[in-house]
Amino acid sequence: MKSNASRKRRTAAAVRQDRLTALLEAGITLSSELSLGAVLQKIVEIARAVIGAQYAALGVVGEDGMLTQFFFTGVDQKTVERIGALPTGKGVLGAIIEQGKPVRLRDIRQHPKFLGFPPYHPPMRSFLGVPIVVRGKVFGRLYLTEKQGADEFTAEDERLALMLATQAGVAVENARLYEDIQQLAASLEDKVKARTAELAERNRQLLQVNEELRRLQELHQAVVESIPSSVLIFDRDLNLVYANPTYFHLWNRQPDIVGKNLRDLFPPETLQREGWEAKMRQVLQSGQPLAERTFRHYVRPRGETIINFDLIRLTGKNPKDDKLLLIMDDVTEQVNLQRQLVQNEKLAAMGLLSAGVAHEIRTPLSVIRLAAYDVREMLSDATQPQHLRHIAHEAQEQLALIERNVLDCNRVIENLLQFAREAKHEPTWLDVNALLKGCLTLAEKDIALQGVKVVERLEEVPLVFAGEDDFKQIFSNLILNAVQAMPAGGTLTLTTTAHDGAVVVSVTDTGHGIPDDVMEHIFDPFFTTKEPGKGTGLGLSICRKIIERMNGSISVQSTVGKGTTFTVRLPVEKEREQVGTSER
C-alpha cells in the first residue's frame, strides 16, 4: 500500500514537473513571437496542451466589453464553418467577462445565463476561464473546456492557467510594443520617404532657380559688358568696385583702376570744377537719381568732352552695402553734329530772308545814290560865292541822310551776320522779353511785306539761364514760321508769363493752321510742307532738341483755318532766379 502511494506521489510530482517545464517552455516560446495574432493563437494552443483540455479559446475584449477577436483550437475547420459566426461575449461568456476573475464550472450548461450552443457546436461541460491582464487592464479571457481524463478542472489547473495568463500578458505587451514599433517605423519610413521626396523636389527647384539665375547673370553680364554706355559702380566710400569694358575702351583706362577711389580717378581740378564728389554723395544720401545732359567733362588726354550721365543709388540689405551706379555716354560728336545742323538751318533761313534783305539794302542804297547825286550837283554850283552858304547847308543834310542809310545797311548786314555766325552755347542770364523784341526786328521786313500785325503781351518774368544764340535760334524760327503761315496777313501775338517755376513763351498766329496728318510729323527731322528750296525741315526738330537740352518743353495747338500756337516752357532755378533778379 505504501509503495503504491509512493508511486502515485512520484507520478503526480513528475506530472507537475512536466507541466511546469511545459509552462516555462511556453513562456520562452511566447516571448520569441512578435506578431500579436500569432502570440494569441500560440497562447490558446499552449494552454490546451499544458492544462489538458479538449478545446481552448481566447477572446479579446473591446472597449464596449464585448469580444472583438476570437482565437480557438481543438475544433476542425469544417466544424467551424458549419457553426458560422464566432461568439461575441453574450450569454455565459458575457457573464464571465463581467466578473473579471477566474471561473471554474463543472458543467457550463448549469449556469443561469447559459443560452445553449449553436447548431453543429461540439458538446461541452467542464469550463475554466481566466483573465489576461495587460497594463492593469483586462485584455481578454482564456477559455478551456472539456478537461481530459477528469470531470472538471482542478485548482492546480486554475493556477497554471493564471500563470500562463500572466506570461500571455507579457507576451501580448511585447507583441503590442513590437507592432507599435513596426507601425512607428512604417510611419517614420513613410515620413522619411515623403520628406526625401519633398527635399528632392526642393533641390530640383533650387537647381532650376540656380540655373535661371546663372542664365540671368550671364545675360546681365553680356548686356552690361556690351552696351555702348560706360557703366561704373562705386561703394559708399566712392571706391570703384566695377567698370564695364566700354569704359576701359572709350576712356583709355586700365583694369587696375578697380578698387581705387574717385579722387584717384580724376584730377583734383576736374573734381572741383565739375563737382563729382558732391553729386555722388548727394545721390547716396537722398536716394534720388540725378541725370545731367550735355555736361562738360574734362579728362586727360582728351580734353573737353560732352557727356550725358545718370547717377543712381543701388540699395543694399544694409545702408553700408549701398552702391552708386554711374552711367556715362560721350555725346560730343552728336552735339557737334547738332550744332552743325543748327548752323545749316540758319543758312537755309538766310536764303529765305534774302529777298527781304535785298529790299532792305536796296532802298538805303537808292537814297544814298540820289543824295550823292544832289551833292555833286551842289558842288558844280559852288563856283558862285553867293550860293556857298546855302549849298553847304544842303550838302550837310544830304550827307546826314547818306550816313543814316549807311547805318541802316550796316544794321541789316550785322543782323544777318549775327544770325549766320556759329552759335555760342555757353549759358548766361537772358532777358526773355528783350531777346524776343530782337527776334522780331530780324523778321520785321517779312512782317511788313505780308501785312502782319504784331501784338506784344510781355509780362515781367525772371531771367533765364541759357545760351543766347540757342534762344535766338528757337524764337526766330517760330516767329518766321508764324509769319509765313499768314501770307494774306493776320495777327502775330507774343506772350510771356511766369508759371510754376518756369517762364512760358507763346507764339500765336491767325494763319491757315496745321492739319492732323501733318501735326504728328512737324518735329520730325527733314519734314517740311514748304516748296523745294524754301525750307529744310530741320527748324522745329532742332528747336525741340535745343529746348530739351535746356530741360524745357515745347508743345503746339492748332486749328485748321484759325491759327496755331507754339508754347515753350523754360525752367527757372530758384537759386539762380534770385541771383538773376538782383543782377538786373
Image (cartoon, grey):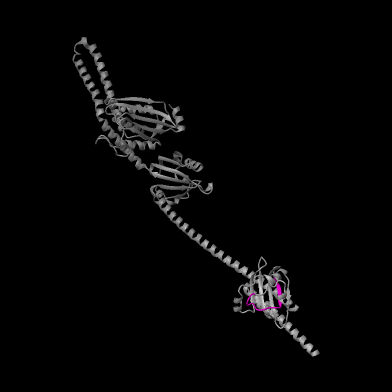
Question: Is 241 placed above or below 379 here?
Answer: below
Judge left or right: residue 100 versus residue 362.
right
**On-image quarter of the C terminus:** top left
Question: Is 469 placed above or below 100 here?
Answer: above
Whole-percent x, y for residue 61 in the image: 66, 69
Whole-percent x, y for residue 39 in the image: 64, 74
Instruction: Say which quarter of the image contains residue 437.
Output: top left
Extent of the magenta region = 118-132
Residue at far top of view: 386
Asked whether residue 510 appears in the rendered view, the answer is yes
Judge left or right: residue 416 versus residue 11.
left
Whole-percent x, y for residue 576 in the image: 45, 32
Depth check: give the residue in front, 171 or 363.
171
Depth check: give the residue in front, 495 or 128.
128
Residue 119 inside the magenta-drawn segment: yes
Residue occupying image coordinates x 38% and y 26%: 458
Depth check: give the residue in front, 296 or 12.
12
**On-image quarter of the N terminus:** bottom right
Instruction: Say which quarter of the image contains residue 69.
Output: bottom right
Whole-percent x, y for residue 506 in the image: 37, 30
Judge left or right: residue 76 versus residue 422.
right
Judge left or right: residue 456 versus residue 61.
left
**Magenta highlight: main SS:** loop
Instruction: Say which quarter of the image contains residue 72.
Output: bottom right
Asked whether residue 431 appears in the rendered view, the answer is no
Residue occupying image coordinates x 60% and y 74%: 84
Question: Is 282 placed above or below 149 here?
Answer: above
Depth check: give the residue in front, 104 or 3.
104
Residue occupying image coordinates x 46% and y 30%: 578
